[in-house]
Amino acid sequence: MDIKRSEEVKLLVARLGFAGYRFIVTSEGCCNVIKSDGQTVYAVSDKDQSCTCPAYQQCKHRIIVMHTRPCETCWGIQYLELDVAHSIYRPILVFECDKCSRTVSALKVRPWVEGWRTADGLGM
């Protein structure tokens, strides 16, 4: 994943937050999206690569869930990043919090990320 992709996801999260969307985490890699009308709910699953919204082919909800998770330390947002500094052989995927800088290995919290490819937008 390149820095540009990470910044795009951060801007998307901010834009949807300002538009009144809420993301309620149901389990690791899964959440419900509540639209600003307070009634429409979409179920998103990172593991299954699915979303129940009508715009499935251009779904932004899946991108957000795929690239973010809540931080257990400060309850900020951890974004998926490529960590090249702490890796000996190859870069590793980590979730890093914008507020407290806490990192956690993506493979530790989401074992299915091993199968992610360049087509998934991670640039690996």
Image (cartoon, rainbow, N blue to C red):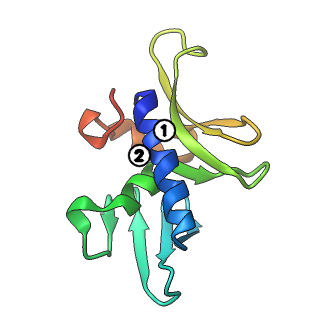
Instruction: Say which residue appears at 74% left-offset and 42% top-offset.
Output: 99
Where does the image place residue 65, in percent across and percent down from the top left? 46, 56
Q: Is residue 124 left or right of residue 9?
A: left
Identified by mark 2, the residue type is Trp
Instruction: Say which residue appears at 55% left-offset and 74% top-offset.
Output: 20
Q: Tag 1's secondary structure? A: helix
Q: Which numbered circle lies on residue 112?
A: 2
Q: Is residue 79 left or right of residue 48?
A: right
* Residue that label 1 marks: 7
Image quarter in which the N terminus is found: top left
64 above or below 35?
Answer: above
Q: Tag 2's secondary structure? A: helix
Q: Is residue 76 left or right of residue 74?
A: left
- The residue lying toward the viewer, choosing from 33 and 88, is 33
31 above or below 95?
Answer: below
Badge 1: how crowded within 10 Å, few (<14), some, or many (20+)? few
Where does the image place residue 115, in percent across and percent down from the top left? 33, 39
Where does the image place residue 106, in percent across and percent down from the top left? 53, 39
Q: CA distance from mark 2 to mark 1?
A: 23 Å
Identified by mark 1, the residue type is Glu
